[in-house]
Amino acid sequence: MNKKTHDADVTFIQALAELLRENDLNELEVMREYGENDSLNVRVSRGGAQVVTQVAAAAPAPVAAPAAPAAAAPAAAPAAEADPASHPGAVTSPMVGTVYLQPEPGAPSFVSVGDKVAEGDTLLIIEAMKTMNHIPAPRGGTVKRILVEDGGAVEYGAPLMIIE
């Protein structure tokens, strides 16, 4: 990467940070492509560090090849667990935001693994644009798995919990 591209990237990231502040956003993620095997991924968020990654296609291939045979055997057995979003009891996120498992810090969690929930019970809260959104259970059942961490970021459509 030459000096001119680096300066342009710094200016681009500063502009994204300004856009985040001016529009009162919590997080912004952008991918900028320079060529076929050269791109810049930037995620800017409030209260967090900026993560900047320069991607080159040639570097990951040799690193991933030796690990594949060892990882293939264990990964084949729990194929259903590898993608919790495809589980029929998966509750997915209706929005992008920050997950909170309790109504306030220090309070007990809305639900725990093994709890029975009824349709409409609050499972967790997702904060999006400074608004706390209660996420209700889409159906009754037992909470089998909680797939998110308290205070973690979540994307639209990401699996949050498994209810059976």
Image (tube, rainbow, N blue to C red):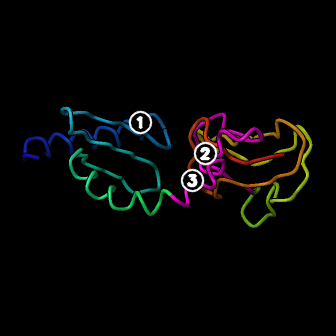
Q: Which residue is mark 3?
A: 76
Q: Earlier in the sequence, mark 3 or mark 1?
A: 1
Query: For numbered disc 3, what is the local secondary structure?
Result: helix
Q: Nearer the viewer, residue 26 or 142?
A: 142
Which residue is located at x 75 percent, y 49 percent? 124
Res 145 → quadrant: bottom right
Which residues are drawn in magenta? 73-101
Work out which residue is located at the far left of the displayed protein and give it.
Answer: 3
Tell me how far mark 2 sits from mark 3, CA to CA. Answer: 12 Å
Query: In the image, what residue type sits under mark 3?
Result: Ala
User: Residue 83: which disc?
Assistant: 2
Could you say which disc has been placed on residue 105 in the image?
none
Question: Image height check: is 30 above or below 100?
Answer: above
Residue at 75 percent of width and 38 percent of height: 88
Task: Please say if the residues under marks 2 and 1 sit with CB atoms less than 8 Å apart.
Answer: no
Residue that mark 1 sits on: 22
Q: Depth-wise, is mark 3 or mark 1 nearer the camera?
A: 3
Quarter of the image where one finds residue 93: top right
Image x and y of residue 115, in percent? 88, 56
Q: CA distance from mark 2 to mark 1?
A: 37 Å
Q: CA distance from mark 3 to mark 1?
A: 47 Å
Q: Nearer the viewer, mark 2 or mark 3?
A: 3
What secondary structure is marked by label 1? helix
